Image (tube, helix red, strand yellow):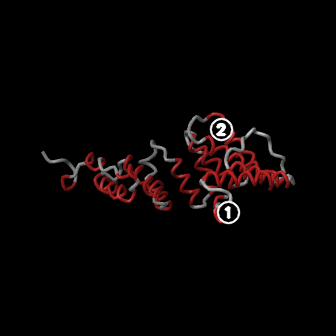
């Protein structure tokens, strides 16, 4: 018995072509397009198309898909995807509105919220968001969140001339050391900042598997 759909192609068969799992989002996008030719309102296919477009850095097109199918996608919240596209398109205020109007504040949405607040220089609110994530999240991104948290403290110190709160962040990575040094510079503690910057350089060279002599100025400047 022939499968339904155009030309005898079944939707389940097309879904089995899971190129996205191998990182081939261009081929995955072609498969999703075939599915949408059969059923233009397939919610899962639309969501998949948005993800593929984002992975291919086609943010404007991804946002257009979301905005065009608002009614169809009403029960399948794409708040994160929409806000992320707006953020990458430098529509920061729009991203903020999308995040704040989301029905559910997931961790990844909160992460993006922190980035948006940082871009808007709303450092106190940003600090609260990252602080909450560090305290309450249990995954593999703790170090990255602490780095973001230290970047906010550095920004407060340099641009708002606020003495940053001591959150007990350990200087275990070159990024954390660098941000700590920036905060110290903002407080005028230049000698201590220089020591921390040297530690950051040492950690970076160690991270790259090289000695300080082999760790070039270019490599250091790119990393920071």
**Relative horizontal placement of residue 59, taking residue 197 as reference (left or right):** left
Please name the residue that numbered disc 1 is placed on: 221
- The number of numbered discs placed on residues in the rendered structure image is 2
Q: Nearer the viewer, mark 1 or mark 2?
A: 1
Residue neighbourhood size for the residue with mark 1, other residues' Cα within 10 Å, grouped as few (<14), some (14–19), many (≥20): few
Quarter of the image with the N terminus in it: top left
Question: Which structural element holds mark 2?
Answer: helix
Residue at 27% over, 45% down: 12
Quarter of the image with the C terminus in it: bottom right
Q: Which residue occupies the extreme left position in the image?
A: 1
Percent position of residue 20, x then y: 38, 51
Percent position of residue 13, x then y: 25, 48
Percent position of residue 106, x then y: 56, 40
What is the CA distance from the residue labelled 1 to the residue labelled 2?
28 Å
Rendered image: mark on residue 134: 2
Percent position of residue 192, x then y: 83, 51
**Relative horizontal placement of residue 25, taking residue 150 as reference (left or right):** left
Residue nearest the viewer, comparing 183 with 104:
183
Question: Which structural element holds mark 1?
Answer: helix
| N-term-proximal mark, 1 vs 2 | 2
Residue neighbourhood size for the residue with mark 2, other residues' Cα within 10 Å, grouped as few (<14), some (14–19), many (≥20): some
């Amino acid at each position: 018995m022939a499968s339904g759909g155009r030309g005898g192609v079944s939707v389940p068969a097309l879904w089995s072509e899971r190129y996205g799992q191998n990182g081939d989002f261009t081929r995955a996008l072609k498969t999703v397009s075939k599915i949408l030719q059969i059923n233009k309102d397939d919610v899962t296919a639309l969501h998949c198309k948005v993800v593929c477009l984002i992975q291919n850095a086609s943010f404007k097109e991804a946002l257009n898909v979301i905005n065009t199918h608002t009614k169809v996608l009403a029960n399948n919240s794409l708040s994160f995807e929409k806000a992320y596209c707006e953020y990458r398109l430098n529509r920061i205020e729009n991203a903020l509105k999308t995040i704040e109007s989301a029905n559910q504040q997931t961790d990844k949405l909160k992460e993006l919220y922190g980035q948006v607040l940082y871009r808007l220089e709303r450092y106190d609110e940003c600090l609260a968001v990252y602080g909450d994530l560090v305290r309450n999240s249990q995954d593999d991104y703790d170090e990255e969140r602490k780095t973001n948290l230290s970047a906010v403290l550095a920004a407060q110190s340099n641009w708002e001339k606020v003495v940053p709160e001591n959150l007990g962040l350990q200087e275990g990575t070159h990024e954390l050391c660098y941000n700590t040094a920036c905060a110290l510079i903002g407080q005028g503690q230049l000698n201590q900042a220089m020591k921390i910057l040297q530690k950051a350089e040492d950690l970076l060279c160690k991270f790259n598997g090289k000695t300080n002599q082999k760790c070039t100025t270019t490599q250091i400047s790119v990393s920071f």
